[in-house]
Image: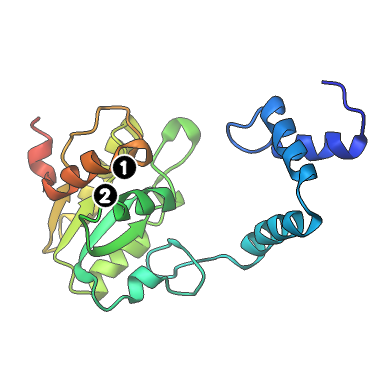
Amino acid sequence: MNFSSKLLEDAVAEFSKLPGVGQKTALRLVLHLLKQDRAEVDRFSGAISNLRNNIQFCQTCHNISDHVVCEICTAPKRDRGLICVVEDTRDVMAVENTNQYNGLYHVLGGLISPMDGIGPSDLEVDTLVERLKENEVREVIFALSATMEGDTTIFYLNKRLKSYNITISTIARGIAFGGELEYVDELTLGRSIATRVPYENSLSR
């Protein structure tokens, strides 16, 4: 792609680094910004810079937060006996959008994937175990994607947690194998949480 401006080329190159954004889409986005008022563009760039410089991760559940402890963990009306284990913040948002869950979360920060060199020590597993020691948790719900990596992670976590006096369950498989949780429609995901099953039972299916 030939550019008439080095400034334009540099901006397109940066946008092209975003997931799912090719050069043509990046060019369209950059040209759109050029049509906006300078104040609009300043707000846009300022929001991105502010996000990167000031974002925090909740010290309890590891969800993205504006504060040391996120608003979900501090909400007095949440059921503190339930912990929903998810891969990342996108999955927290997906579950929240169902309006079918009122407990707490634990964000692992990824899934076990030996092919990618990601093991249990790379995930927030130890802090999940510590939460079970310190709090009156009665149930842990695995809400991980229906993929090989998701199943491997659930299998490992079940072994780590089964010695505790809690119920371990997993969302019902209304989700096709290979499906990423964030892309599941809210109705299906909500039903999967509401009709969750004990993890041991899911192994026989």
Image point 14% across, 49% down: which residue? Answer: 194
* Residue 95 higher or lower than 127, as above or below: above
Quick check: can you spot residue 171? no
* Residue 5 higher or lower than 63, as above or below: above
Image point 66% across, 27% down: which residue? Answer: 22
* Residue 124 higher or lower than 147, as above or below: below
Residue 2, horizontal then vertical, whole percent: 87, 22
Image point 34% across, 48% down: which residue? Answer: 94
- According to the picture, the residue beneath numbered tag 2 turns out to be 157
Q: Are marks 1 and 2 in contact (CB under 8 Å)?
A: yes
In the visual, does 90 lie left or right of 166?
Answer: right
Image point 73% across, 40% down: which residue? Answer: 32
Say which amino acid is labelled 1. Answer: Thr
**Which residue occupies the foreground of this view, 153 or 49?**
49
In the visual, does 13 lie left or right of 119?
Answer: right
- According to the picture, the residue beneath numbered tag 1 turns out to be 153
Quick check: can you spot residue 52? yes
Which residue is farthest bottom? 76
Say which amino acid is labelled 2. Answer: Leu
Figure quadrant of the N terminus = top right
In the visual, does 172 lie left or right of 112?
Answer: left
